[in-house]
Amino acid sequence: MATLITPENLVYERPEAFTDTPTHYCPGCTHGVAHRLIAEVLEEMGLIGRTIGVAPVGCAVFAYNYFATDFVEAPHGRAPAMATGIKRVLPNNIVFTYQGDGDLASIGMGEIVHAAARGENISVIFINNANFGMTGGQMAPTTLPGMKTTSSPNGRDVELQGYPIRVSEMLATLDGAGYIVRRSLHDPKNIRMAKKAIRMAFEVQNRGLGFSLVELLSTCPSNWDMTPVESLKWLEEHMIPYYPLGDYKVAPAIASVKI
Amino acid sequence: MARELWEGNQAIAEAAIRVGLEAYFGYPITPQNEILEWLSRRMPELGRAFVQAEAELGAINMVYGAACTGARVMTSSSSPGISLMMEGLSYIAGTEIPMVLVNVMRGGPGLGNIAPSQGDYNQICKGGGHGDYHPIVLAPASVQEAVDLMPLAFDLAEKYLTIACVLLDGSIGQMMEPIQLPEMREVKRKEYPWATSGANGRERHILTSIYLEPLEEEKTNLRLLKRWEEVQAKELRYKEYFLEDAEIVVIGFGTAGRIALSAVRAARAQGIKVGLFRPVSVAPYPYGRVAELASRAKALLVVEMNSGQMLEDVRLAVNGRTPIEFYGRLGGVVPFPDEILSEIQRVAKDTPKVVDDPAAVWLKRMDSVTK
């Protein structure tokens, strides 16, 4: 019997930018999708040997296990500052951070705002899944009003716990920010759009056009207490209305970049 | 090179430049702003990296990132700012990469004041941030010594893959003295086998301070400790004055040591057999040398601009074998040489006894000083 494993039958293979490491993420979590999109972009752009990643604190703390690039692991929220330090002494390298919403929008808000304001020539992949994943699903700055988490057991009460922060919209107000967009990972069409945005973010950096950030609406089935399919549906129905997808800042020099 | 009149902070900054500083990240705080200001002009004109960060948190993590590439990198700050940097310093220690920290102490706790103090000795000498680690700490007593310690700090940080701190206070940072700066060296980035610079044609490098497996973390801690043991054996530095026949040994570091030297000279003029021991490396601390000096002294007099933080190290070295007296001024108050002279006179006249806690005895005496 002829083997099915032949080049013409190939439908999936590990990108070169990935190491051969089994995932530690929960079943149905979209971190894996986001990782793969970055890996594909690094491979397609030929950037693997020049790239230095900065991992966050959170579920992606071990992001460096998956990428075949140099990597450092930042203190909670400080990834944009570490990336700044690396980029300033290695301006010809590609430096990106990978951060969740607790890391970037809570403890690391100072670092991300000022990296964007300085127009730091780095790329940020921002995973918004509306909760602190690794510590067990506590309320994040991105948790939706009324959403139940382990630290807002009765649902986020905006009178007591304030309102969610729309990071992309906020950072887009800064003159230093070059490319700020929000995408979603809930279906194949949106995943393709997310990949294009990630590609654009790295193109922006590679051409020295300034600060780029791609916010990716993501699922957290374990902490949302949903099946993977339910969580994708929940993202589409609840998160996208609060966090509309779109391009929030595309600086004039970047608008003409074709990929 | 001719001697020139330089302000301490600016001299420290220029010395760092001349010995190959590639990147500086900092945040304004008095009394060390002149370091940041000097470098904000000099670093860009030399094509080197300078960023005024949004806070000390940002600054120390920019240092962390740049240090991961193997670049020669430093930051500077003062007491409240150093407290904010402690998180990053612990990560840097845990990642085993080199950096230099210039720590210009001021009065505390809290917002305190901007006057010279040595109140942060324990904070930096005993680690400061969380976890088991030891920064190397060097304490100059003059602008020239601060300048001379800068290249040493970089060399030690890079040799032992650790934090090297130059610990001073606002008086040394702000005063002007004639000094000789080092010659301008060419910047040459060291080739470290661990540096993250892009995995082009080599295995990838990962720099992290997380070891989820406790046995691995223990190995890391033991590795740090072994390295510290080597530092303790090889990197002790101190200055000795009039100690050959001294019956009373005054011990003080940095500015307190310098003021004590004036008092020791005045006491010598009065025929009192007194000398000064001034540790330059306060971490590692020269315990062995203090013990030797104590074994042949009638008494030790520890002088500090704090409540007796280094006193604890002296007590550890002496281990109750020799009487120890303490004199401290706190909170940004700088002692006059006369105050220390009268302490020396008192100790020379009295028959000092070994007491449980020299600081407690001093505290009682302070009632009359501050009334």
Image (cartoon, coloured by chain):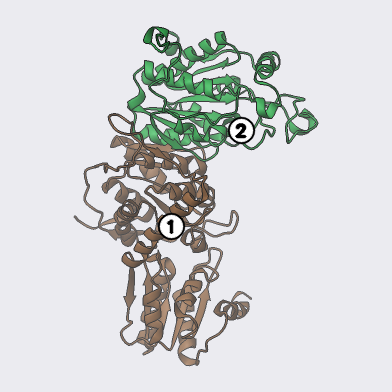
Q: Which chain carries label 2?
A: A
B279 sits to left or right of A73: left
Question: According to the image, label 2 marks what residue?
Answer: A102
Q: In which quarter of the image is the C terminus of chain B?
A: bottom right
Q: Please name the amino acid that badge 2 sits on.
A: Gly
Image x and y of residue B268, in percent: 36, 85
A26 sits to left or right of A2: right
Label 2 CA crowd tier, 10 Å (few <14, some 14–19, many 20+): many
Dot in front, 1 or 2: 1
Instruction: Identify the residue shown where x is 51% and y is 31%.
Output: A114
Front in this rendered view, residue B256 or B235:
B235
Front in this rendered view, residue B280 or A202:
A202
Is residue A116 positioned above or below B44 on the image?
Answer: above
- Shade of chain A as shown in the rendered figure: green
Q: In which quarter of the image is the N terminus of chain B?
A: bottom left
Question: According to the image, label 1 marks what residue?
Answer: B222
Q: Which residue lies furthest to the front in this view?
A: A1
Chain with colour brown in the figure: B
